[in-house]
Image: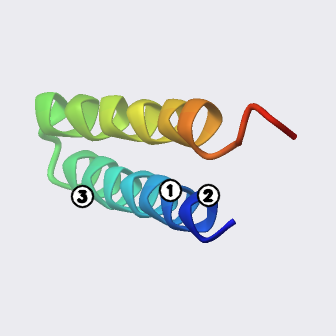
Amino acid sequence: MEKTRLRKLIGLAMVALGLIQTGTGIMQEDWVFAALGFVYVLIGVAYILFEGYELGQ
């Protein structure tokens, strides 16, 4: 249970940082930086989906 909670927290942190990076990139009109932030958001969501849930439940 504790391991699952930690994995979800890591995934949520990845999503939050990616959203901050995307927003900052858009405000500064740095589209590559914004796109990489969005990719980081997608990786965080995938991490939550694949690592955040235990297969036994």
Residue indicated by mark 1: 7
Q: Amino acid at mark 2?
A: Thr
Image quadrant in which you'd find residue 34: top left
Q: Amino acid at mark 1?
A: Arg
Q: Nearer the viewer, mark 1 or mark 3?
A: 1
Q: Nearer the viewer, residue 51 or 16?
A: 51
Q: Residue furthest right?
A: 57
**Residue 5 sits above or below residue 32 on the image:** below
Q: Position of residue 28 (x, y in %)?
A: 15, 53
Please report contact status of discs 2 and 1: CB closer than 8 Å, yes or no: yes
Secondary structure of the residue carrying numbered label 3: helix
Look at mark 2 in the image and give the residue it sits on: 4
Q: Amino acid at mark 3?
A: Thr
Q: What residue does disc 3 label?
A: 24
- Say which of 16 and 56 sits in front: 56
Image quadrant where one finds the N terminus = bottom right
